[in-house]
Image: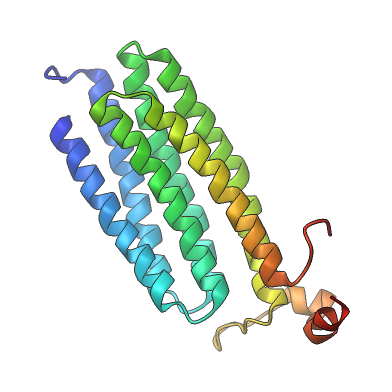
Amino acid sequence: MTDFLYTAMLVLIGVSFLCLFRMARGPTAPDRTVAMDALGTILIGFCCISALLFDQEWFVSMAIVWALMSFIGSIALAKYLEGKFYDE
Amino acid sequence: MSDFGVTEWAACILMGLGLAFDCLGAVGLVRLPDVYNRLQATTKCVTLGTCFILLSVAVFAFGHGQVSMAVKALVCMIFILLTAPVGAHAIARAAHASGVQLWKGSVVDKFKEDFGQPDKELDHHER
């Protein structure tokens, strides 16, 4: 099981580098926002695999907080790109 | 973790499914030609893949008696399932409003037919 968890972490690191490639290469700002959203979602899974691997429960709490912050960041960036204020 | 019972097998299968969905979503993010196509690739595949990974963590933790960790993973899964479509919808709307063109092979733009391209210059002068 430990070997499988290490393999899963390596796969997720590779997937994160694909997201970073799109974030560096993306022609427009919404492309980078999409890549940032996907990267946040992938890192939530990474945190939970770390919780299983090191048998520490607070990694899952960190994943919940990360999900919240990623959602707020996506909404704020979308509102900024749309050129509107936050209450409309 | 030496003995490999039913719980471990279920967690491994669910985690493998999740990793496959994550990989496909990332390949779609790199390979597709347009911000809207990339958005629909990542927001479905990556969300479902991460939900599978969280479900496997919940199954494994519940099988090993760590109930609070399992409940936290399930809560995180429900939260991602609720918030990822909202964020994707906001990003797509913002991309269309900020004037990102569709790919040249796209055949229909219902949002532009219904509401028209928003006048961005006027909006910036108002602020």
Which residue is at the far top? B65
Total number of numbered discs in the rendering: 0
In this picture, residue A1 sits left or right of residue B123? left
What residue appears at the point 27 percent right and 23 percent down from the top-left corner? Answer: A55
Q: Nearer the viewer, residue B19 or A61?
A: A61
In this picture, residue A24 sits left or right of residue B114? left
What residue appears at the point 36 percent right and 29 percent down from the top-left corner? Answer: B57
Report the coloring of the rendering. rainbow
In this picture, residue B3 sits left or right of residue A45? left
Q: Quadrant of residue A58?
A: top left
Quadrant (top left, top right, bottom left, bottom right) of the N terminus of chain A: top left
Question: Where is B85 relative to B16, above or below?
Answer: below
Residue B16 x/y as whole percent: 28, 41
Residue B109 x/y as whole percent: 70, 78
In this picture, residue A86 sits left or right of residue B23? right
What residue appears at the point 25 percent right and 33 percent down from the top-left corner? Answer: B12
What residue appears at the point 37 percent right and 23 percent down from the top-left corner? Answer: A57
Q: Nearer the viewer, residue A44 or B77?
A: A44
Residue A14 x/y as whole percent: 26, 58
Which residue is at the far right? B126
Q: Nearer the viewer, residue B46 or A39?
A: A39
Which residue is at the far bottom? B104
Quadrant (top left, top right, bottom left, bottom right) of the C terminus of chain A: bottom right
Residue A4 x/y as whole percent: 18, 37
Q: Quadrant of residue B62?
A: top left
Q: Nearer the viewer, residue B32 or A14?
A: A14
Question: Where is A52 relative to A28, above or below?
Answer: above
Question: Where is A45 relative to B92, above or below?
Answer: above
